[in-house]
Image (cartoon, grey):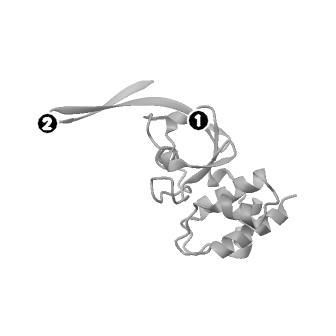
Amino acid sequence: MVSFLSFSNNASRLTHTKIMATYSITVNGETKKIDVASDTPLLWVLRDSLGLVGTKYGCGIAQCGACTVHLNGTAVRSCSLPISAIGTSKITTIEGLSKEGDHPVQQAWQEVDVPQCGYCQAGQIMSAAALLAKNPKPSEEQIATAMNGNICRCGTYHRIKEAVVLASSKIK
């Protein structure tokens, strides 16, 4: 289905037309159909169209990591990824990481008491989970590299690293 959304400015007689399309995407193991413009960032599809608000808006330019989700198991910044680029990829958000909130990274986050304000935590957890899925026993340097680009306004980086190390010990 394709629909058109038109905006006009009578003063300058400019007309802007956005083409809306229907996309079928897999989010947290469920297929969802959505009608959005092709350039809509995945972040806004998740939050506004699907009501999955665990993924946060931080900067809008893929520099802070608050919007991190998994695309086929790889950590990606959803604020700069247009829905048209998703195709058949599988998306996992913080809500889909584990049904009971018992993923080893989530457990470690609680045990170490990582969050302070909590705003960046979903993105931090998703980056850590992607790292540990690919490398269950990373070195401290590998942890630092994987978590680079996830900004914590409160500066809890030492607790974040400690939690990633603890989570890696929980993975069998």
Of the numbered discs in the image, which one, if any, rests on residue 131? Answer: none
**Could you tell me residue 17's position as x and y percent?**
30, 31
In-front residue for pair 103/155: 155
* Image quarter of residue 37: top left
> In this rendering, would 48 be left or right of 55?
left
Mark number, residue 12: 2
Relative vertical location of residue 57 with respect to residue 111 in this rendering, above or below? above
Residue 15 can be seen in this image? yes
Q: Is residue 31 above or below residue 55?
A: above
Residue at left 60%, top 65%? 121
Q: Is residue 33 visible?
A: no
Between 53 and 72, the one lying in front of the other is 72
Q: Residue at x 58, y 53 (%)?
A: 68
Residue ID for mark 1: 25
Q: Considering the image in quadrants, where does the N terminus appear?
A: top left
Residue 150 image point, x, y percent: 58, 62
Please state if 135 lies on the left or on the right of 21 as rendered.
right
Tell me the SS state at disc 2: loop
- Label count reads 2
On the image, which quarter does residue 90 sit in? Answer: top right
Label 2 amino acid? Ser
The amino acid type of the residue labelled 1 equals Ile
N-terminal-most mark, 1 or 2: 2
**Element at label 1:** strand
- Residue drawn 48% across and 57% down? 57
Label 2: few (<14), some (14–19) or many (≥20) C-alpha neighbours in 10 Å: few
Q: What's the CA distance linking mark 1 and mark 2? A: 38 Å
